[in-house]
């Protein structure tokens, strides 16, 4: 079994494990399995070994929270000497001259960046395929690992790295985490700040354990206290499976299972759902198109995949028509605050549909992509618009396919520690398989 990030860092700090050896081990796992899994767009083998040697020589090694931990980052990240493709052949290939804030924080914490993980073009879709590869689900490789942080989820679920970085604009951390049976946290917009998609996209962790997710978010957010996970005092939990379209029975049943486990832990559990205005659903859909459209100005439109071209055209129309309105978010936040005045946490299915089959979705039409995508993200995008923290955690597994069933926990701003604490209670009461 691959060690957790917490275990690797503790061993390195204690002088029991060499960061170079930890990196060699990760690179060996990648070499052995990534031909099947397809997690990485680029593996930084020589660079990672050199970085690991630098970590080993640091005078502050014994205090580094991610000392020697091999980490994968999503192919949207600014790392010196690398370029980010955003899953597209249409963008620039100029390497960054310096690290962005995310990579700076990871490296300052002692992490070793072993590679850049696969994403769909402009991070639009919940399936991470490109013309040169498909990120497959390690739990069942005939299915996709999700998106847009699908490569990161594949890398962690296959045990290639213990933790990985992702971004989440409509569910892009939580959905692949759910599809691959991982812990995935979308922090609130107030924790790290937002980047793109009209304030909906944030950075966050994918991990096999709650402790690892907490450790990584503590580094990404530069908030060391988040690494300490404690069982919360009893809280009021609402369960909901309400969605505009039918949810598969097994995915809905996971919500009841989570509710029973948390009720046994002493929490008050009831059924309730927030009132979601139609304007909220339309506002999320508009931003799903408009966010990539605003980013596409830096790309060669003619070189986009056909599904992306249609999406960007629609997004540009939404922007010109003035349909990206702050009042849409304000109205939804008012409804969310009304709901959370009498509930501390909301639990829903993470995904509204099983994962899509692995394959060349980039070669298919916009409509063929958008219909399952909209169903899959029925529960997640609402909370990006609100800016609320939300976390996906495994609950069970479908015996027919081996695919995980997971739930989403949502709380008001500033309650990431509460979500992690509840997830740790679920983990203790209902342990899940860490890797495939």
Image (cartoon, rainbow, N blue to C red):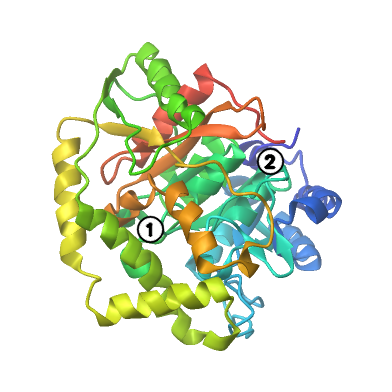
Q: Is residue 127 visible?
A: yes
Quadrant containing the N terminus in the rendered view:
top right
Q: Which residue is mark 2?
A: 8
Q: Considering depth in this image, is 51 or 72 the residue closer to the camera?
A: 72
Is 333 on the left or on the right of 147, as rendered? left
Q: Which mark is residue 81?
A: none
Give residue 47's position: percent from left, percent from top. 76, 68
Nearest to the eye among marks 1 and 2: give it: 1
Q: Nearer the viewer, residue 371 or 41?
A: 371
Left or right: 126 in relation to 390: right
- Please provide percent x and percent y for residue 182: 57, 39
| Residue 300 x/y as whole percent | 55, 88
Residue visible at 57% across and 42% down? 179
x and y, in percent, of residue 399 in the image = 65, 24
At 68% from the left and 55% from the top, the residue drawn is 135
Query: 286 above or below 148?
Result: below
């Amino acid at each position: 079994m691959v060690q957790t990030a917490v275990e690797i860092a503790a061993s390195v700090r204690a002088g029991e494990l060499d960061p170079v050896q930890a990196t060699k081990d990760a690179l060996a796992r990648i070499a052995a399995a990534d031909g099947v899994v397809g997690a990485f767009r680029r593996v930084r083998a020589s660079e990672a070994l050199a970085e690991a040697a630098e970590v080993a020589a640091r005078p502050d090694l014994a205090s580094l929270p991610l000392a020697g931990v091999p980490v994968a980052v999503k192919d949207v990240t600014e790392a010196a000497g690398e370029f980010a493709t955003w899953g597209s052949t249409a963008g620039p290939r100029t390497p960054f001259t310096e690290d962005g804030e995310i990579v700076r924080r990871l490296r300052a914490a002692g992490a070793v960046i072993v590679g850049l993980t696969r994403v769909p073009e402009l991070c639009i879709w919940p399936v991470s395929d490109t013309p040169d590869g498909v990120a497959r689900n390690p739990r069942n490789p005939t299915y996709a690992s999700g998106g847009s942080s699908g490569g990161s989820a594949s890398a962690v679920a296959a045990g290639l790295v213990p933790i990985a970085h992702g971004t989440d604009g409509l569910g892009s951390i939580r959905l692949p985490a759910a599809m691959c049976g991982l812990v995935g946290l979308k922090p609130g917009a107030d924790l790290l700040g937002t980047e793109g998609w009209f304030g909906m996209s944030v950075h966050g962790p994918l991990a096999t354990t709650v402790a690892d997710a907490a450790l990584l978010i503590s580094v990404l957010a530069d908030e060391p206290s988040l690494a300490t996970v404690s069982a919360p005092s009893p809280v009021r939990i609402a369960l909901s499976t309400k969605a505009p379209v039918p949810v598969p029975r097994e995915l809905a049943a996971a919500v009841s299972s989570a509710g029973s486990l948390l009720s046994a832990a002493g929490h008050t559990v009831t059924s309730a759902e927030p009132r979601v205005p139609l304007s909220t659903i339309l506002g999320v859909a508009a931003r799903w198109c408009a966010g990539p459209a605003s980013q596409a100005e830096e790309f060669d439109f003619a070189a986009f995949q056909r599904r992306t071209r249609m999406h960007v055209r629609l997004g540009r129309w939404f922007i010109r028509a003035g349909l990206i309105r702050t009042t849409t978010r304000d109205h939804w936040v008012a409804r969310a605050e009304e709901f959370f005045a009498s509930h501390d946490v909301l639990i829903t299915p993470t995904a509204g549909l099983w994962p899509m089959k692995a394959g060349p979705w980039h070669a298919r039409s916009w409509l063929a992509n958008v219909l399952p995508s909209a169903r899959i993200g029925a529960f997640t995008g609402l909370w990006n618009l609100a800016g609320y923290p939300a976390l996906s955690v495994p609950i069970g597994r479908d015996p027919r396919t081996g695919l995980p069933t997971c739930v989403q926990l949502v709380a008001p701003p500033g309650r990431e520690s509460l979500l992690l604490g509840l997830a740790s209670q679920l983990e203790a009461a209902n342990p899940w398989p860490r890797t495939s």
